[in-house]
Image (cartoon, grey):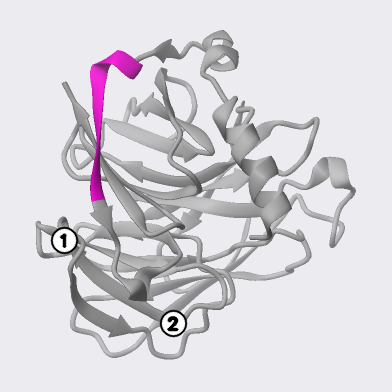
Amino acid sequence: MNKLYYLLFAAKTVFSTCNPDKANGFDKIYSHYTFTKIGKLPVQANESSGIAKSQNKNAFWTHNDSGGKPELYEIDFQGKLLSTKPVPDAKNSDWEDLAEDNNGTIYIGDFGNNDNTKRQLTVYKVAPGDSTTEKITFNYADQKQFPPSQENFNYDCEAMLYHNENLFLFSKNWSRTNKYVRLYQLPAQKGNYTITPFDSIQIDTPVTSADISPDGKIFALLTYGKILLFGVENNEINFKKPMGCFKFVRKQAEALMFVNNTDMIVTNEQQEFFRITYR
């Protein structure tokens, strides 16, 4: 990130608040949490962009952003590198988020699309103990131009979660006027799919990561400057039950993971990571 862009990004993040989200039914819940900087990520994870649970309960997986090696790094909660897992038959075009299922399978979202020019995007599926990688490829049914007009730059994605044998993708909107985040559903099985948005919500800052609580009752969206929580009703992922919003400004925060039903870990691309603890 060049210096000028970083300064513009930093200013936008600092001035981001939850005030616009009150109209959508969110409560301000900053006082419900404490925030602790745990430390630094190892040098191998110098641009952490996604995190997911490891089968080791005291560790998590992460990866680097676009141009990084096609490998995952297992890191404990003190910041120590425990292992490195190369992902065979994969390329890090623009890895942006991770998700995991109950069997420990990791899903790697290679769907970063800042320029909105890609016609096909990929999620890599890596099962524990398996030496092969499956590909889930997809395109957006609603994208007709590559790239679209600047005001319709809504085909980047940096946020994904797994729920009930499906992946749920949240768009990262770069438009200056169209601030709606689109929600897509993608089968968590090998194949090629065309996906259509089935829900949307107005959020004034770009969404950079998503995760769902272990009990499946809450999902969270990390944005530049805040975190938004939604309730899960009837076992369905959608925007119908907004719950709470709290400001979270920690540089370029791009990855979030629940460690239990209330607490979260967040990493940023400056090698820092934090624990968010419910009081």
User: Which is nearer the eye, 31 or 214?
Assistant: 31
* SS for dot 1: strand
What label does residue 170 carry, if any?
none
* SS for dot 2: loop
Q: Is residue 267 above or below residue 60?
A: above
- Residue 193, given in percent of the width and then of the height, sits at 59, 65
Quarter-wise, where is residue 190 in the image?
bottom left
- Residue 63 painted magenta: no
Identify the residue at image location x=60%, y=66%.
Answer: 138
What label does residue 70 carry, if any?
2
Quarter-wise, where is residue 44 in the image?
bottom left
Look at the image and tell me in which quarter the C terminus lies.
top left
- Amino acid bearing label 2: Pro
* Magenta residues, dominant SS class: strand
What label does residue 59 carry, if any?
1
- Residue 35 painted magenta: yes
Identify the residue at image location x=85%, y=40%.
Answer: 151
Identify the residue at image location x=49%, y=50%.
Answer: 159
How many residues crowd around disc 2 within 10 Å: few (fewer than 14), some, or many (20 or more)? Answer: some
- Residue 54, given in percent of the width and then of the height, sits at 19, 63
- Amino acid bearing label 1: Ala
State the residue lying farthest toward the right: 149
